[in-house]
Amino acid sequence: MSGAAILHDGDPSADPHAFRRCLGQFATGITVVTSRMGEESVGLTVNSFASVSLDPPLVLWSIDRKSRSFAHFEASGRFTINVLAADQIALSRHFGRSGPDKFKDVAWSEGAHGVPVLDGVAAVFECHREAAHAAGDHLILIGRVERAMLMDRSVLLFAQGRYRIAGDHPDEVAADESAAAGSSAVLAALFRANHRLSADFSRFREDLTRDQHRVLIGIEKNPGLRFEALVEETFLGAQATQDALSGLVSGGAVAVAADGALTLTPKGRERRRMLNANLAEMESTLLAGIPPGVLNAGRQLLSKLAEG
C-alpha cells in the first residue's frame, strides 16, 4: 500500500477500540428501528441497516444481544426502519440511550400494522420479519418490506466517529455548471483544493491523524482552553475531538490539568514544530511560480472567509 500513513494494522480481537475506528471509516446512514408488541413500543438507533434484495424486497439490520430491546425484537414479527434526516441528530441520540417510554416526547404515528413511524424522517420501510441469523454478539434480522415511503429530505450520515451530512463531491460538479453558478465556482474550487491539499499533506503528518493535527493547532493557539472550547475551535464535533485528544494525551503530546485545562507538552510542541516545517516545505513547492499579486488576493479572500 502507498499514499496515506497506516494508523493501525493488527488483530481486531486484540484491540477492539482500534477495530471500531477502522469500521468508522465506512460512512453509514442513521436509522431508528421501531417495533410494537401489545401496548409496548420500542425503538433504538441503528446504523447497520442495509438493502439485501429488490426481488423480493428485503433489507437487514443487526441488534446487540446485550440491548435492553433485544428480547422484544427477537420475539417480534414486525419492525419499521426510520431513516433519519439531516436535522435529526437529537432523535438519533435520544433513541441511542437506554430509558423507559422513549416515545413520550417524540412525534410519531402508527404505521399500517401499528408499528411507530417517526415524523420528519427521510424514508420509511415497514417490514415483517423474513429470517433471523445468529452472528457473534449480534442477531441479524432480515425483513421483507411491505411498504416503502420516500420524503423530500436530506439524510443524516455517520463516519469517523461523528455525524455528517451528505453533499455533492466537488469533483462531480461539471465545469459548465460551476461557471454558470458564478460565485459558487469559487467555492467548488476551494473544496477541491482542500481535498487535494489535505490528501497531499497526509504523508507529512507521520503517525498523526488529520483530527489530531487540528486538535494540536487548537491547543497551541489557545493554551489552557477546556474541552468544550476545543470542540468549537476544531469544528470536529465532540466525539471526534475526544477521540483525537485521547490519542494525543496517551501519546504524551497533550497534558490535562486538574481543572481540565489543555496544554501542549514539550513533545507536543516539538510535533507542531516539525509539522510546521513540513507545511512550509509543502507550501513553498506548491506556490512556486505563482505571481505575488495572485497570492495576495488569495490570502485576502481566505482571510475574509475564515472571519465568517
Image (cartoon, rainbow, N blue to C red):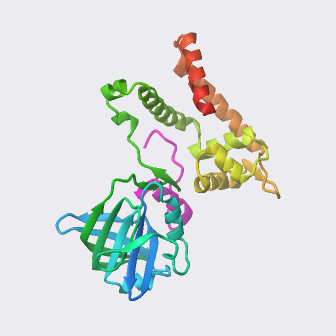
Residue at 66 percent of width and 56 percent of height? 246
From the top left corner, tell me how far across and down residue 68 is, in percent. 50, 81
Q: Please provide the residue range marked out in magenta.
A: 1-29
Residue sitting farthest toward the left: 55
Is residue 112 at least partly visible in the picture?
Answer: yes
Left or right: 206 in relation to 170: right
Helix, strand or loop for the magenta stretch, by majority: loop
Q: Position of residue 140 (x, y in %)?
A: 35, 75
Whether residue 209 is visible to the viewer of this picture, yes or no, is no
Asked if 190 appears above or below 112 in the picture, the reply is above
Viewed as shown, does residue 131 lie left or right of 239? left
Instruction: Tell me if 24 is positioned left or right of 110 in this view.
Output: right
Was residue 75 drawn as part of the magenta stretch in this picture? no
Residue 84, position as x, y percentages in the image: 42, 61
Relative horizontal placement of residue 267, taking residue 280 as reference (left or right): right
Q: Is residue 6 magenta?
A: yes
Which residue occupies 46% across, 33% down? 191
